[in-house]
Amino acid sequence: MRAVVLALTLAFVVNINYVSVPEFAPDKTYVYNYEALLLGGLPQEGLARAGIKVNSKVHLSAVTENTFLMKLMDPLIHEYAGIWPKDPFVPATKLTSALAAQLQIPIKFEYANGVVGKVFAPAGVSPTVLNLHRGILNILQLNLKRTQNIYELQEAGAQGVCRTHYVINEDPKTNHITVTKSKDLSHCQERIMKDVGLAYTERCAECTKRVKSLIETATYNYIMKPSSTGALITEATVEEVHQFSPFNEIHGAAMMEAKQILAFVEIEKTPVVPNKADYMARGSLQYEFSTEILQTPIQLIKISNAPAQIVEVLKHLVVNNVAMVHDDAPLKFVQLVQLLRAATLENIEDIWTQFKNEPVYRRWILDALPAVGTPVIVKFIKEKFLAGELTLPEFIQALVVALQMVTADLDTIQLTASLAWHEKLSTIPALHDVVMLGYGSMIAKHCVEVPTCSAELLGPIHEIAAEATSKNNIPEITLALKVLGNAGHPASLKPIMKLLPGMRTAATSLPLSVQVDAILALRNIAKKEPKLVQPVALQLVLDRSLHPEVRMVACIVLFETKPSVALMSSLAGSLKTETNMQVASFTYSHIKSLTRITAPDMAAVAGAAHVAIKLLSPKLDRLSFQFSRALKFDIYHTPLMVGAAGSAYMINDAATILPRAVVAKTRAYLAGAAADVLEIGVRTEGIQEALLKSPAADESVDRITKIKRTLRALINWKALPTSQPLASAYVKLFGQEVAFARIDRTIIEQAISLATGPKSRELLKAALKALQEGIALQYAKPLLIAEMRRILPTAVGLPMELSMYSAAVGAASINVQATITPPLPEEIETMTLEQLKKTDVQLQAEARPSIAVHKFAVMGVNTALIQAAVMARGKIRTIAPGKVAVRADILKGNYKVEALPVEVPEHIAAMSFETLAVARNIEDPTAERIVQLVPELSLQNRQTDLAPVRASAPFDKTLCLAVPYIEIKGCVEVHSHNAAFIRNDPLFYIIGQHSARATVARAEGPTVERLELEVQVGPRAAERLLKQISLIDEETPEGKAFLLKLREILETEDKNRPISSESNSNSSKVRTRDLTANPIDPFKKFHKDQYMAHHGSSKAVSSGSAASSFERFQKQAKYLGNTVPPVFVIIARAVRVDRKLLGYQLAAFFDKPSARVQLIASSIAENDNWKLCADGVLLSKHKVTTKVAWGTECQQYAVITKAEAGILGEFPAVRLEWEWEELPILITNYAKKLSKHIPMAALQAGFRFERATNSEKEIELTVALPSKRSLNVIVRVPEMTLSRIAIPLPVTVPINPDGTLSIHIDQDILFRVQNYIYDCTTGTNI
């Protein structure tokens, strides 16, 4: 047996030793047929795809021992955009002819032992063409081992250095060697790719462990034949697949498939002759990027004269977006951005010089330039600002966007640094801060592109921080920390730690705000190096000598480092003995919030939090909201790989009522990536310190007294110190701080001076004058909302791109005209309040706001020569014209708003979404081919290929609704056709064609001239009533006859209604709880002169007295309008050409002696008796009763509400009762359905549930306060009673034993407020 094994082993080794690497003998030319195919789309047949095919002969010959020439012969390029597989490829004849000369230039390359070395080519060979050659050379890359037939290594190729698996076999019968090489392109030491717009996103590795959005793999199969010089490749085939889905790939994915075939034909004697031009080193086998970044994949533009083309597009945008936005404006704007990317600085200078004095063109240029994202633009913006050609608002807007969009290379970083330290910016602190923050963001983006980025880039900021610390320059220290926080470089950890308290540094002498900023600067570092930040943050949290706010902010940073179970348990252990309740509450609530997190990247932290929370006392969960809290919540859907999360932090101080800091943050998850979208923070550090020095900080007083003292201190803001900010705020976008503001006493004084000084009066005067003369304004605003791209090389040598674009253009045309009678005085500041009251102001305004949004998602080939891709394109366009007239006659108390007729476009809103296969080339732009991805009514095959399936017919439907009275009809047309007939998955529901259009037009009937809303206040209110109000008195013969007739009508309607029976079987399944152990005490009312009732008082007596008192008031005056005039009248109506009254009127009455309020709304139509009557009476200081009745003459339906204060047991309480006689059938039906779910919901909410024979037409809610921080609740509804005791309250309720609230307005505070208002308004002058 041993002999057999030894023989087999020797035979295997002998066979392997004969495996040779490919060799090309000198004096011979090897001829191959080559075909490369790159095709994108869905894998199912019968759907459209887009792609490119290249056919050619390949000639290979040796120049020296390790240097070879390769030449393509008879190359031919094909395009494809059609239904796969039935439609044919189409030759791109013009493109082939244009590239033929380049394609047939021989290239030179080094090749030894199956490995491709350097590549050489003349300057006339473009990077795109050279990359096609690299695609062929990539096939020749073979790292063969003589001693192994199965092995794995990291192999260099056109796409980078990636994990590669080899399997080698020998067929003795055919004397052929077969080699199979598999590449996992998702696991590379060095992956060649370019990302745009993704610098601030984080890769969520945990999100893609179970499900993936992008899968990339390649398989190479070789058949080689031994020869005298080595091995000859007789055939090589390559299959590469890139599969992408925004959702889980299990639910369907788009696919980019690359195929290559290299087949040996013959050996010729004629050698390949090199080109006469000089051969220059052009890199290695790795793909070389050229102009892919500048070329957008959504359109192919042949740029022959960039300045002229820019001007042409610019004029199109200006001319066609005046009155309303043009449908293709977003696409044209993206085209303008693309052209500007190809322009030189001199080109842009010339265009600026041509149009800078034309306001509309100037705005379009300044809106487009920041989106270009090239260093040229940053340089242009800098030069124009320093030359004084840009206003400060223009410069800030352009620079902030440009710094976020620009490519962060070393030159751009240096350019930004030179701008940040320019002397002109140092005189404008706010602008200096913005540029410095942008400098930190630039470094962060650069370090994403170059992970080994040098720490020297932050050297100047470290020096600024050190110098500012030595000089105790607090604003400079704060700014330096924020810049370091944006950069997030681990090398900044030591400089930051020097400013952290408790680190044996002098930081404890620095203001608290600096210490907090230093801790927050660690957050972006923690994302890269959490293990470095964790011990620092934990030490700060556990140091009880530090300020509580410092410890709570450190807690935020600690949890963002995703601590382990051991670290979390250590924190929980220390929390058991924590003496500061603010820190304890904040940390406990933070840990508890983490237990509910479902996002995959926080799964380990959530598990650790579950362990830690068990170690802590649940008493911490019952702390009120006066203590600091952290709240986290999220939602994540694994099958779709989408999610959202939110965080909120409130840091309080026991000594004051104002929170020290409030922070809110949102986070998003999509397709395996995560990003902190928005964060807003506010701190009240200066105000807090001032309050701590005031009597408001006395911890011995109650909370109400603290509130009074705090308000008094805030009103005396002029006494606050000027040496420090009173408050500060910051805004972060995608984890980068883009703006912050410090508010101090000087800023408040300047704001008040601006608002009350002569400048504000001049502005008001100019505005009023412009209104009287008439204002006509047209404005357009474009925005490149998103540009996210990932560009990857394929085996073929052409780039594949995954990208998402979103662009919007808004436009508005506004016309305003005002008439003021009598005219305002020339010196408007002398105008008195009495003069203003006598003014009649009429204003007419017309506006036509419109917006167009285009969204694109692309997967395919994108070069400057040819594009072939599958694309999802979405469009939204809305137009909302409006015309109103407003009149305010202050003397007469009449105010009127009229909506006037306006010209409406055919569609006020249109939305469309379609998926396409597109192929186009630069030499023949008119031959662009666009095919719908899902063809309508065509034969399709399921993925199983069992039988052909006919596509479902498109869904088309039109829904219309006519609005009564105003005679307007709105319609929505919907069209939808998708691929769900292939697979019942989300992706297949999305692809296809979907559209919706909304129209508004006049309906049939008399024309409506205008809509009116009129308000009349004061003694003339009754005169404005369009229809006399009268209420039926049930005691009169006429009233009894009317009620009898109405009852007959309602009974007839009830008989015609279908009777529905509802089963209560489900409710019986819910277990009831016995309430006998805790009997419910009766509610006792308060008397007018005493708060405690006698024990004999009962609900029946209370309710009866309340009802009788209320009915007595109603009998005395059914309609208050007979005795008192209306306080105000509101009329809403449609004015038609036939002058028929249509609409409603509302009259409000108040009878002060009886403390009774009555509201009556009624239809003003001639034969419409519908009314709504609301009556309310304050029967005593503890009792209120209201009745709301509606229907014909307010007699169909009615609900009586009673609110009464009293006691329940020994505790102050309030009882609310709702009683009704008749309700609309719609309400009762929904109530019956809802009642089925009440028992289960009540038990889940902790309520006790009991079946009871309560009134069928009454609901009672009783709430008692056993303490100022807890509630007892009893709810009685038909057939059941619910109750719960000791419900904790987040805040203390200031209630007295007699049921009154212990809140009193401080007269001193009122006097100060009134006096302050008087000072600001200088008496009665406006």
Image: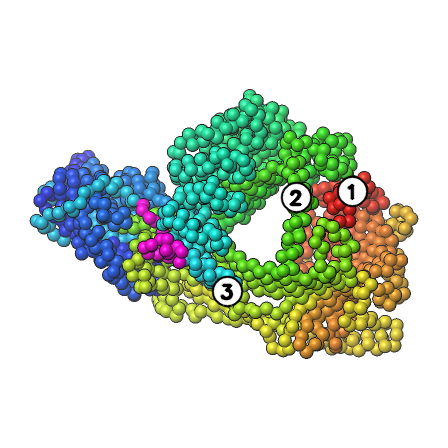
Marked residue nearer the N-terminal end (1 or 2): 2
Q: Secondary structure at mark 3?
A: strand
Labelled pair 2, 3 in contact (Cβ < 8 Å)? no
State the separation of the CA atoms marked 1 and 2. 20 Å
Image coordinates for residue 1054, horizontal then vertical, percent: 72, 74
Query: Could you tell me which residue is drawn at 65 percent across and 36 percent down?
Result: 746
Relative to 30, 969 lies left or right: right
Residue found 60% across the figure and 77% down from its top:
1004
Secondary element type, mark 2 = helix
Q: Is residue 251 left or right of residue 828?
A: left
Q: Nearer the viewer, residue 1146 or 742?
A: 742
Query: Quadrant where the N terminus lies?
Result: top left
First in sequence: mark 3 vs mark 1: 3
Residue 156 in view of the camera = yes
Q: CA distance from mark 3 to mark 1?
A: 55 Å
Contact flag, marks 3 and 1 (Cβ < 8 Å): no
- Amino acid type, residue under disc 1 in the picture: Asn
Q: Position of residue 303 (x, y in %)?
A: 33, 54
Residue labelled with disc 1: 1315
The answer to whether the residues at label 1 and label 2 have Cβ atoms under 8 Å apart is: no
Which residue is pictured at 73% across the width and 69% down the height?
Answer: 1144
User: What's under tag 2, amino acid-wise?
Assistant: Leu
Taking the image as shown, residue 137 lies to the left or right of residue 993, namely left
User: Was residue 1203 drawn as part of the magenta stretch in this picture?
Assistant: no
Magenta-colored span: 289-312
Name above or below for residue 464 compared with residue 1164: above
Q: Which residue is mark 3?
A: 910
